[in-house]
Amino acid sequence: MMARETVTAIILAAGKGTRMKSRLPKVLHRIAGRPMLGHVLSLVDEIPNARSVLVVGPDMDEVATYAKGVAPDTGIAVQAEQLGTAHAALMAQSDISDREGVVLVIFGDTPLMHPETLAGMVRTCRDEAEIVVLGFRPKDPAAYGRLVLDEEDALQKIVEFKDASEAEKGIALCNGGAMAVRAEYLFDLLSRVGNENAAGEYYLPDIVGLARAEGLVCRVQEGEEEEVQGVNSRADLAMAEAVMQRRLRHKAMADGATLADPASVYFSFDTVLGRDVTVGQNVVFGPGVRIADGATIKPFSHLEGATVAEKAEVGPFARIRPGSSIGAGAKIGNFVETKKAEIQEGAKVSHLSYIGDARVGAHANIGAGTITCNYDGYNKFFTDIGAGAFVGSNSALVAPVKIGDGAYLGSGSVITKDVTPDALAFTRPKQVEKSGWASAFRAKNESASGKVKD
């Protein structure tokens, strides 16, 4: 790999995020089931030959640990004092040894950028310019910095709103913050940025003026307004979640799934739906869910860490917890909860049941109200239900226990021992009837109280 082809992303994440009013670092707050920083790291991962250097503040070990867990080759730099974005980017210098290739400077709290936008910035920086700035055209430019272009559409300067002339305030193209810079120029430019401003900080956009003074070419790569949306508060977090959910819903439908009410379905970043999957209203997909072709997820179901095979049915009102796999053509019905359970092909768990730490064999039938008693307060135990077995309603299977293929369990049974294949097992006391007992009981109690019950 030629050094010129390398890409290093400096991810600025040293901000304290005080407006979040949270003990959790801002960039670890989740959107679609993944921390914001995880979304940004994944963007970098989609760029060929790219790696990241994360700039954090002091005492932000939790952020660094997360980044290393997601991308082990991520470099970590510490900005001991919060002196501005240019100063933060300069902290990454020791982690970027070569002076060739392209350096992206992006932000850990802008998780909505498209990988195509970053790739376009890198490509333009390699082929046409020494610096590429991300620009966007908001519906309301408000107080954004303006990008002033020359007659050849090269970036001439970035003007902060408060410093802009009336003509410059009329410019619709605004500064999105992110930059791509050829590595051979970046750190020299950063080192020469001054702090002669009201805040006394070193600002990243100032490198454009320094670069232009040296005759370097600066250009703009335009992106969508939502891409530059930063997250600084809980309200911002909710807005970013809404954007991400809209994207995920659109992708699911574009890939061949039917969403009965798209706005009520919530996805995680890694949800995978096959073709001809039907998803009902008010379904929530937690992380780690894969739904195969032709499956149906009925309304008000919650799935997390689970797989659902072809033409299976789940719900309504089902909870499929981590470690569950629902086999082809299997049916999980209303108010059924599974956890770490393998429900094999064609099996049915149709009503009001809990199946945890268990296998339900192919084409077995689990009656309403059945539970696997898998926990003794300290340890979990396994229940194995064979193929074609029939478990009567309101049964309790006390694990560890094995129900053989084709066995029948009588309704209301508490099964504590293994059941052999094709056997009938039940634990039910003999029914006793005492004629006239009920009327005598009522008469006795009504006489004692002096009242006749309505």
Image (cartoon, helix red, strand yellow):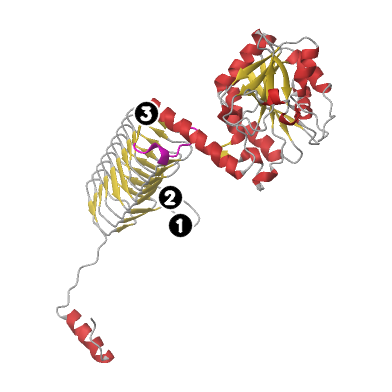
Q: Which residue is mark 1?
A: 376
The kind of residue on which mark 3 rests is Gly
Q: Which mark is residue 161?
A: none
Q: Which residue is mark 3?
A: 274
The single residue placed furthest to the front in the displayed view is 166
Towards the viewer: 126 or 423: 126
Residues under numbered marks 1 and 2 in contact, where contact means CB atoms less than 8 Å apart: yes
Inspect this view and state whether residue 49 appears: no
Q: Callout 3: helix, strand or loop?
A: loop
- Residue at image point 30% right, 56% down: 395
Residue 85: % across, % down: 75, 29
Q: Which residues are magenta?
A: 260-270
The kind of residue on which mark 2 rests is Phe
User: How would you rate the neighbour count of disc 1 (Cα within 10 Å): few for under 14, some for 14-19, many for 20 or more?
Assistant: few
In the image, taking residue 438 as reference, residue 354 lies left or right, namely right
Above or below, 353 relative to 258: below
Residues under numbered marks 3 and 2 in contact, where contact means CB atoms less than 8 Å apart: no
Residue 227: % across, % down: 58, 28
The C terminus, quarter of image? bottom left
Of labels 1 and 2, earlier in sequence is 1
Q: Nearer the viewer, mark 3 or mark 2?
A: 3
Q: Considering the whole magenta stretch, tell me its main secondary structure.
A: loop
In the image, taking residue 444 as reference, residue 178 lies left or right, namely right
Q: Which mark is residue 381?
A: 2
Q: Give the distance between the C-alpha atoms of the residues marked 3 and 2, in whole angstroms.
A: 33 Å
Q: Give the distance between the C-alpha atoms of the residues marked 1 and 2, in whole angstroms.
A: 8 Å
Indicate yes or no whether the magenta region holds residue 448. no
In the image, taking residue 75 as reference, residue 324 lies left or right, namely left
- Residue at image point 67% right, 48% down: 23
User: How would you rate the neighbour count of disc 3 (Cα within 10 Å): few for under 14, some for 14-19, many for 20 or more?
Assistant: some
